[in-house]
Amino acid sequence: MMHTLRKLALASSAFVALATGAYAQQTVVWWDFLAGGDGVRMKALIDQFNEEHQGEIQIEGTTLEWGTPFYTKLQTSSAIGEGPDIATYHLSRIPLAVDSGTLSEITDEDMAGAGISDDDFTQAAVAAAKVDDVRYAVPFDQHGLILFYNKEMLGEAGMLDDNGLPTGLDGMENFEAALAQFTADGKYGLSMPTGDRYRAVYSFFGQQGGTMFDEAAGGFFPTDEDLAKLTTATETMKRWVDNGWTPAQIESPAALALFTSGQAAFFIMGNWEVPTFTDLAAKGEIFEWGAVELPVLFDTKAAWSDSHAFVIPANAGKEADPEKRAAVMQVIAWMDQNSLDWAGAGHIPAFNAVRESEEFKTMKPQSDYAGFADTAVFDPRTILAGPATPLGDAWSNYINPATTGEIEPADAAMQMRDDLNSQL
């Protein structure tokens, strides 16, 4: 009898050990490209996860250089089975990563094992995480182009509602009237870095319902109508420059300073600048400001967007480890479920429960522009898209110069189309 009880006790102890993870702690090797404020916030999340999962799962994190160095190292490391267990990634680069064999498929079973599914995320991000309906990433956030505004200037002009939000900006005529109104006495209606104008152009292209890429229909800007919409979007930004409503040539630091010094009523930039303004406000070094979605200037709401996401490198030749994979999926699910702090960086949580929570709704100005998550215009699904890729080069070589008159917008559109199609 004693022997039987002892065996039961040992079995029970083993079960508890397995359930708590103490039986075999999993170390998850993590690579990211997050620097600055993003890096600080992610480090805090990793530390919190490790604290909550001691003896079960521990993340061993490394931050690498953003852009081409990160993606090249991940691709080469995965090809020889020496990549990490998990990595951050931009969804816009997923097609290229899949084409190079860098990523492992994340199955419905993987998701279910971690208690999550596609229904938990914004559908725009879910679609961008797949290639040919196969999932290769799990979204973490959406970041995109928004409109920052000077509440003091708009308030004096009678253009704020009772909640301090701008009024009367939708429609090209209304928005351009506002730009003209605030361009006076050495001040501008709008500040935006010259090098980032392509994001606004792509947003306006999306607001016209343009198709940037359709492989079956001929590649980039497959119809004359699509090319015309790109031309119109580019001409819009050029008109703002020609009318003096925004500086013709201005670098990012100067564009930021132009707005924060009260010399421009509006600033169009990515939501990642929110922490910059939040920090200045905490020091009392900036006026009262806000941020909302881009105005609808054409047919429908749309704004350039991308997502930080989590991927699992394929790691060629490395033996599959179901327990390690389950641990990685638990890390992914936990990060999404605890992404409210990440929203402090200005990003919009891709996880619906967090984005729709009361805690997020009280987060300002994030909740004022969160609607762009549902109408985001991601890069087209092609191996040429994403950060540090030929698509970015084409925007810089043709469209940005066209906004300052160096190239005619119609010529720039055709040259961009022909250049990209020649690389397919």
Image (tube, rainbow, N blue to C red):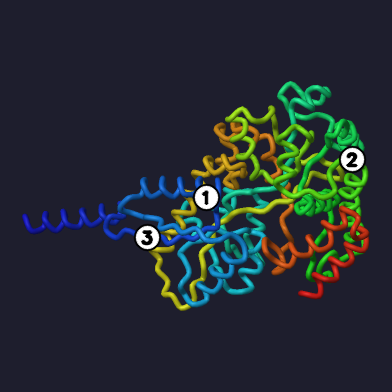
The local secondary structure at tag 2 comes to helix
Q: Is residue 312 left or right of residue 281?
A: left
The residue carrying mark 2 is 172
Q: Earlier in the sequence, mark 2 or mark 1?
A: 1
Please state if 152 lies on the left or on the right of 20 as rendered. Answer: right
- Look at the image and tell me whether residue 374 can be seen: no
Kindly tell me whether residue 69 is visible in this rendering. yes
The tag on residue 39 is 1
Give the residue type at disc 2: Met
| Front position in the image: 50 or 287 | 287
Residue 88 spot, x, y in % from top left: 54, 58
Q: Amino acid at mark 3?
A: Thr
- In space, the residues marked 2 and 1 are separated at their CA atoms by 38 Å
Q: Say which quadrant the N terminus sits in.
A: bottom left
Locate residue 378, reporting x and y percent: 71, 55
Residue 73's quadrant in the figure?
Answer: bottom right
Label 3 crowd (10 A; few <14 / some 14-19 / many >=20):
some
Q: In the rendered image, which residue does mark 3 sit on?
A: 27
Q: Nearer the viewer, mark 1 or mark 3?
A: 1
Q: Marks 3 and 2: in contact by CB < 8 Å?
A: no
Residue occupying the point 65% across, 43% down: 273
Nearest to viewer (mark 2 / mark 1): 1
Q: Amino acid at mark 1?
A: Gly
- Disc on the earlier residue, 2 or 3: 3
